[in-house]
Amino acid sequence: MLGTAAEMLKKARSELAPDPKANPLVRLVADGRASLETLAALAPEQHRVIPADRGAFLHLAQRATEEPTAAGFFAMPAEGEEPAAERLGAFTEACEVDAERRQAYEPLPGCQAYSAYISWLALNAAPTGAVLAVTANFATWGT
């Protein structure tokens, strides 16, 4: 028996929770010790991630026609990508990344893995299953 939705979500969150020390970049950024070059690599990655995630969430919302609550759930992060996209230009400029450097940048597979997964969900997963996967991820990412 699968249990209630709340039980399933709690289980998914606990199984997916990362080691808080697993990503040293988060600590460097939080402490103000990340180098400009490191942040400059993040900017072009985000130029790919933000529109990809927005498109995937919009696609999930469109696919969830029989599940209006799920459709609304996916519309929310799609809308959340808009302010991120609006602020990305200022971040990119502050990191001294010009258009030529941004276009020449070769994305790192690990940085694009989440977007690839969300895109896969958008194309293949049942919307209700995708809700669980995305909710567990947001709970972890938000921490």
Image (cartoon, grey):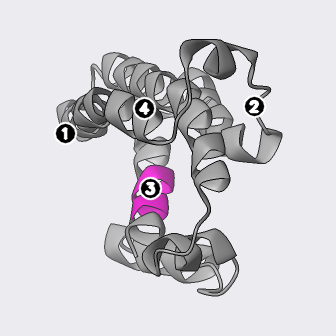
* Quarter placement of the N terminus: bottom right
**Is residue 109 found left or right of 97 in the rendered image?**
right
Circle number at residue 1: none
Q: CA distance from mark 3 to mark 2?
A: 28 Å
Counting other residues with Cα less than 10 Å from the Cα at mark 2, is it few (<14), some (14-19), or many (20 or more)? some
Q: Which residue is mark 2?
A: 107
Where residue 11 sits: x, y (%)? 52, 80
Q: CA distance from mark 1 to mark 4?
A: 38 Å
**Most distant residue in the front direction:** 96
Please tell me which of labels 3 and 4 falls first in the chain: 4
The amino acid type found where label 3 is placed reads Leu
The residue mark sitting in front, 4 or 2, is: 4
Are the two marked residues, 3 and 1, in contact with CB atoms closer than 8 angstroms? no
Q: Which residues are magenta?
A: 132-138
Please tell me which of labels 3 and 2 falls first in the chain: 2
Please tell me which of labels 3 and 1 falls first in the chain: 1
Counting other residues with Cα less than 10 Å from the Cα at mark 1, is it few (<14), some (14-19), or many (20 or more)? some
Please tell me which of labels 4 and 2 falls first in the chain: 4
Where residue 7 sits: x, y (%)? 40, 79
Please tell me which residue lies in front, 70 or 19. 19
The amino acid type found where label 4 is placed reads Glu
Where residue 119 sits: x, y (%)? 59, 27
